[in-house]
Every structure is written in C-alpha cells, then in structure tokens.
Amino acid sequence: MPISRVFARRVLLGLAAVATMAVSGARPALADEASDFVKSFGGQLVAIVNSDEPLEKKKQDVLPLLQKNLDIAEIGKFCLGRYWRAATPEQQKRYLSLFDHVLVNAITDRIGDYRGVTFIVTGTSHAPTGELVSAKIDRPGQPEADMQLLVVNNSGYKVVDMIGEGASLRLTQRQDYSAYLQRHNGNVNTLNDALQRQIEHHH
Amino acid sequence: MPQQFVRKITLSAHIPISLTELYTHQDHIYPQGASRPGGVAFMAIARRGQKRTIQSGHAGQKAETTRDRQGRFSGRRELGTAMHADFDGLESEGATRRDTGPGKEAESVRGTSRLPRLAAGVLTLLTLTACSSWRNPPPKDPDALADYKEANDPYEPLNRKMYSLNMWAYHHALRPVGKAWAWVVPKFARDAISNLSETWNEPVAFFSDVGAGKSRRAGDSFMRFAINMTAGVGGLIDVATPVGYPQEDGNPGMTLATWGVPSGPYLFLPGMGPGTVRDAAADGIISIGLAPIDYVPKGYGLLTFNWAYNIAGRLNGYADAIDQIDNVERDALDPYAFIRSAWQQQQAVKIEAFRNDNRATVPDWYN
C-alpha cells in the first residue's frame, strides 16, 4: 500500500476522531446551558409562586416570565399539527394570538394552588428534538412530582414542551385539537372560535 | 371491577347531544348547531400510582407506539374475525335445523322454536347494525389515516358512548359523593384507606412482576406487602416506602405487554376507564384471581367488610381526582381525546420502564 494512501487514511481517521470528540464535548456544554436555563427560569417562577404577593400580582409578574422563556408560537404550531399547513395566514395569526392567551391562562390558573414549592433540576438528557431537562417539584402535603422540560436553542434557550407523568403536554394538546377539528370538518375557524369562547368564559 | 381497588381517577366529559340539556356549562365551547363529541367518560390515569411519578422520555414513547400500532391492527383483525365467526355459527345452525326438519314433528319443533330463533336473529341483526356504527372505518386521506393510526381508537363511537355514560354518572353521583366524602372523612383516614388499597393490591403486582421475570420488582412488592401488613397494621400505614420499598407499577396487562402480546385497540369501559383490549382482559380476569380480598370467605361479616373496603377505595380515588377531572373538562376542547392521548402516552412510558427495569436483586445498600 503506498505510503501516501496510508497517510491519507490516518489523517482522515484522526480528523474523524477529533470531530467525534468535538461533538461529544459540545453535548455536555449544551446540556449544562439548558440545565442552567431551566434552573434560572424555574427559580424565578418558584420565587413568584412562593411570594406573599396577592394572587393577581403574582399572575401579572409571571406573564413576562412566560413570554420570555416559552416559545409559545412554536408550541402553538405543534399543537395545530397538520392543520397548520391548511390554515390561511389570517387563521394562523388569529390562532397563535388565541393560543397564547389560552396557554398563559392555563398556567396562571395553577399559580394560586401552590405555596412553599421547591424546584430542583435533577438531570439532562439529549432528545432528537432538543435537550430534556428533568426536574423534581416538591409541594407541601403532596407527593413529589417528576417532570421534564424540552428546551431548544433558537437564538436563546426556550421551553417548547413539558412532560409530566409520562405525557407530553403539547402532544396531548395536539390530539385534543386534532380530534376537535376532525369533528368539525377540519375548519380552523371553528377551532379559533372555540378558543375565543374559552378565553371569554375564563375567570 | 370493584376489586381493582383505588385508582387515581381522572374524569372528563364530553356531552352527547341526547344529554345536552343536562349540561349547559360547555355551551361556550361548541357553536350553535355544531356536532359535539359524543360521550362522557372517566379514566384511571395512574392506577395505584398516586405516590410516585414516572420517568419519561420521548424515545420510549415512540418505541411503544410502534408496538401498539402493530398490535392494533392484529387486535382489530381478531375482533372482526370473532364477530364473523359468531354470525356464521348462527347461520349454519339454522341451516342444519332447516335441513333436518321435514314432517309434522319437525314442523312442530320449528313452530315452538321460531320465536326464540326470530328473537336471536333480530338481536344478531341489531348487534351487527350497531357494530357497524361502533367502528370508524380507516379514512382514505393519508394525513387523516396517520391520525387514525396514532389514536388507535377504531371503536371511538362506542368508546365515546361509554365515556358519556361515565361522565353522566360522575356529574350526577360520583362527584357530589366524592366531594362529600372528602369533606366528611379526615385526611389521615383517607390516606389510610388509600394505603390499605395499595397494600392489598401488592399480590397482583408481585405475580405480575414474577410473570414478567422482574425479580427485583417482585422482591420489592413482596417486602412491601410483608412490611405493611405487619408493621403497617394490616396495610393502613405505609411503612415500606420510608424503609426503601416504594410502591411500583405492575399489573397483568403490563406483564402481557412484556411477553409481546399486542395491545389491541383502545377501549373505554364503564367503571374501568381507559384501557386496551389486552389490559381489559388481563385486569378483568387475572387481577381478580390474584387479589387476596377475593378469597375472603363469605359470612362472619367479612363479606360486608369486602364491600366496605371496595366502596371506600373507590370513593377515595374519586375524591382525590375531582380537581384533575374538573381541570381537564375546563381546559380541553375534546376531553375524551385529551384523556385518551394522555393515558396512552403514560401507559407507553410505564410499560417501557417496566420492560427496562433490570436492576439486580440485591438491595441497594449491598452495592
């Protein structure tokens, strides 16, 4: 075998090894960043939940935190599934606006339920769709709850899913909307109207 | 199936048109004249799983989904075949009787048996007609077909009817009674009943673990039962968890899953909540045989205790789940589909965790 070919092969293998090391080195860094992001977000959220402020004030404080740390548009698109492509730009715009309200309402409604909450990040794993950060939530008088947050880095880390007791929130929501749309001839306007009514009747 | 003890039950409702007048609180969701998702239901989201949560992962969910899809098709085929076999059986029996019936005696026999046969025929016809409306045919559109396969719910029309029935019962009886139960019975007593139900169900978990070859889990279940039945005063106090034997999921349906038995289609059964053909068969038949409460002899007041135990366990489950059920009803546009999706995902993760639990049989402190 010519020496040049042996040399070329070694260089190639060497480069491959370096590339593998670079990727495996990058992954822990990504995992650490995702973990730090969740620690920071969770810490701020828990500080608001545990504060002595009145409930309305807590809800106001949580709102910018959610807008900043959740990729609500991405979650909304995922939840509409295949109907996103079929929707007109106007329907998409209205849907995203309504979905934003519905999601924020669903989260802020739960704030009043908890007090004395502790939040600990327990680990990170890599998933095809992002970094999965595991956390443990402890509430007084309640069993410990394990959850996972799916975090993606799209010009800054954001949460795109929450998995509690094995169920992905956005997947469950997508199947809820999908079933509703199937029963209403796939008309996104009907879904938008239903979301609108949900918001109007929210208290 | 009252012997199934406490389940963490989550109910949610969708209201069939025939029950519209009974439920006006969801009118804001459905526009005038729009069809509502039929059905009301309840679900047992995490049987005996109130004190623990399940580690989850997307990879596990995908793996199970694939298996479920395979199982779904085979399960459906089996059901379809069985249905036709029954019908064919009736037909051939009738044909045989006709062939062997010339003469007055035979005429007389035919005359006397006509009514029951007619009734059977009408019943069969009605059943078959009903069956066709119970089952959604696979859609032609590829996207819709993908949704159909993902939901694994070909008997959705029937399941939604069962769901309606359950939610009707929930709103009219179980919810108010559950609320009253939670108000009257102090928390410590409710916890004790919950512990009792869980402990007495440990033999079911033990044999399920043994069947699946999960020796560590089987040992843990055995220890839990032994500790809680003695130090825990017959199961009223959960002493086992603090000493390193937490409650773990394990039931005959999960064991069958590890054997490769396909899940079959999604089923929503009254009183049992969400499940699959496999779960319903395993829980309905095997669990009853494995639960010690079923061997309580009649008389001596123990039968009364059996009833009290089951009813209290049930009420406890409802009382603990009312808030969750109400949340789903409030937040979901189609609670039936919401519950189905959540349950299927949770079940897939539970089975995956069960399958992958290959811990050593020596206790943790030994390592």
Image (cartoon, coloured by chain):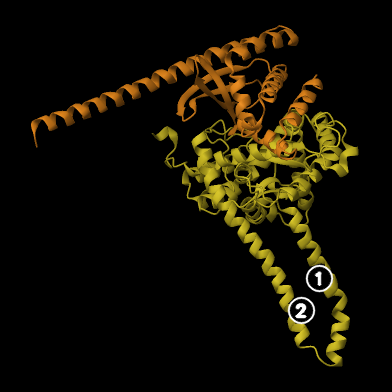
Chain colours: A orange, B yellow
B154 over A67 or under it: above or below: below
- Residue A170 % position (x, y): 61, 29
Amino acid bearing label 1: Gly
**Left or right for B106, reference A93:** right
Q: Is residue A142 above or below residue B343?
A: above
**Residue that protrudes farthest toward the bottom in the picture:** B103
Up-down relation of residue A85 to residue B249 (above or below): above
Task: Left or right? Give the position of B38 relative to B246.
Answer: right
Residue A36, visible in the rendered structure: yes
Q: Amino acid at mark 2?
A: Gly
Q: Do callouts 1 and 2 point to residues on the same chain?
A: yes
The quadrant of the rendering that contains the N terminus of chain A is top left
Q: What residue did someone put label 1 on? A: B121
Q: Position of residue B151 (x, y in %)?
A: 63, 43
Q: In 3D space, how far apart are the residues under numbered discs 1 and 2 (Cα atoms)?
A: 10 Å
Q: Earlier in the sequence, mark 1 or mark 2?
A: 2
Q: Residue at x 70, y 9 (%)?
A: A60
Choose top left, top right, bottom left or bottom right for residue B249: top right
Q: Dot 1 surroundings within 10 Å: few (below 14), some, or many (20 or more)?
A: some
Q: Secondary structure at mark 2?
A: helix
Please state which of residues A91 and B98 is positioned toward the viewer in this rendering.
A91
Query: Residue A84 lies in what quarter of the image?
Result: top right
Q: Which residue position is annotated with label 2?
A: B94
Q: Which mark is residue B359?
A: none
Mark 2 chain: B
Residue B105 in the image: above or below residue A69: below
Furthest residue to the left? A2
